[in-house]
Amino acid sequence: MKINDAERDALYKVIFSRRDVRKDFISTPIPNDVLERILKAGHHAPSVGFMQPWDFILVTEDQTKNALKKGYESASLESAQKFSDEKRGEYQSLKLEGILEAPLGVCVTCDRERNGPVVIGRTIKPEMDLYSTVCAIQNMWLAARAENIGLGWVSIIHDDVLRETLGIPDNIEIIAYLCLGYVSNFNDKPELEEFGWLPRGDINQLIHKEKWTNKA
Ligand SMILES: Cc1cc2nc3c(=O)[nH]c(=O)nc-3n(C[C@H](O)[C@H](O)[C@H](O)COP(=O)(O)O)c2cc1C
């Protein structure tokens, strides 16, 4: 099957217009068929040795979201202490999650023991199962954007809060908590870029020919 030009352009449009979303969520629920497509996109990600180590925990109840929001708030306070005095105020003014506003939360996990102790391709670098799960998340992120659904990754929360709130067993690795929902707006640029926190780097500084070169 060949990809035609319009299909290629659509893919790049999705890639370049994907954003991490934490505000502008609206309450419209995500229809089941749309959610199924997004989860299926995740499940069709590449995985080391075709291990498919992921699970997806769907969160819709306010009580669960409230517990996670509390976890975020204390982790955020703890995080603020790590920034310099001059950056701390700026950090605290950023909105870095949409746990309560997003109609759906999805916790993505990695079962490091799935399909046996020896997995093709994971014999030398065991962390490949974690990377595979991140591939699933990126597929979901792009699929969500193609559905005009915003997705935001919340990493400012301790695993034990997610583990306890969502009943995740100790042998399962927690990779991400994602907030999903329709949005009133997708920003053209990353919010951190708009805000002046960091610019996008110059790709030419990141490409090396044949060997690593130290660039200014
Ligand atoms: C692994 C990972 C963790 C992230 N965690 C957070 C987070 O906790 N809160 C947040 O607001 N954004 C989080 N982000 C989003 C990044 O800030 C965002 O991707 C980056 O600023 C570029 O913006 P864009 O995704 O809109 O292009 C995370 C992104 C990744 C890939």
Image (cartoon, rainbow, N blue to C red):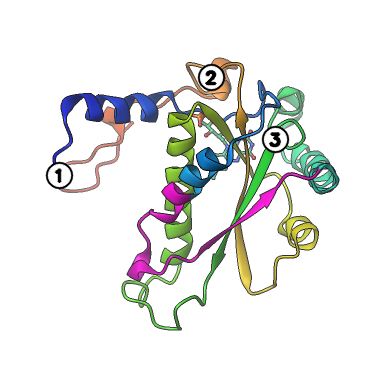
Mark 2 vs 1, N-terminal side: 1
Quick one: quadrant of the N terminus? top left
Q: CA distance from mark 1 to mark 3?
A: 37 Å
Kindly indicate the quadrant of the structure image that contains residue 125. bottom left
Question: Helix, strand, or loop for circle 1?
Answer: loop
Q: In this rendering, is residue 34 above or below 49? A: above
Cα separation between marks 2 and 1: 32 Å
In the shown orientation, is residue 95 left or right of residue 208?
right
Kind of residue indicated by mark 1:
Met
Among the 4 quarters of the image, the one containing residue 172: bottom right
| In the image, residue 29 above or below residue 173 | above
Amino acid type at circle 3 is: Pro
* Residue corresponding to mark 2: 186
Q: Residues within 10 Å of mark 3 (few under 14, many from 20)?
A: many
Q: Is residue 42 magenta?
A: yes
The residue sitting at 42% across, 51% down in the picture is 135
Point out the image quarter for the C terminus: top left
Nearer-N-terminus badge (2/3): 3
Q: For this view, does 112 lie left or right of residue 93? A: left
Q: Which residue is mark 1?
A: 1
In terms of depth relative to the viewer, which is nearer, 124 or 130? 130
- Say whether marks 2 and 3 touch (CB < 8 Å): no
Figure quadrant, ligand 1: top right
Q: Which residue is denoted by mark 3 in the rendering?
A: 103
Q: Residue 121 at what x, y percent from top left?
A: 32, 72
Residue stretch in magenta: 40-61
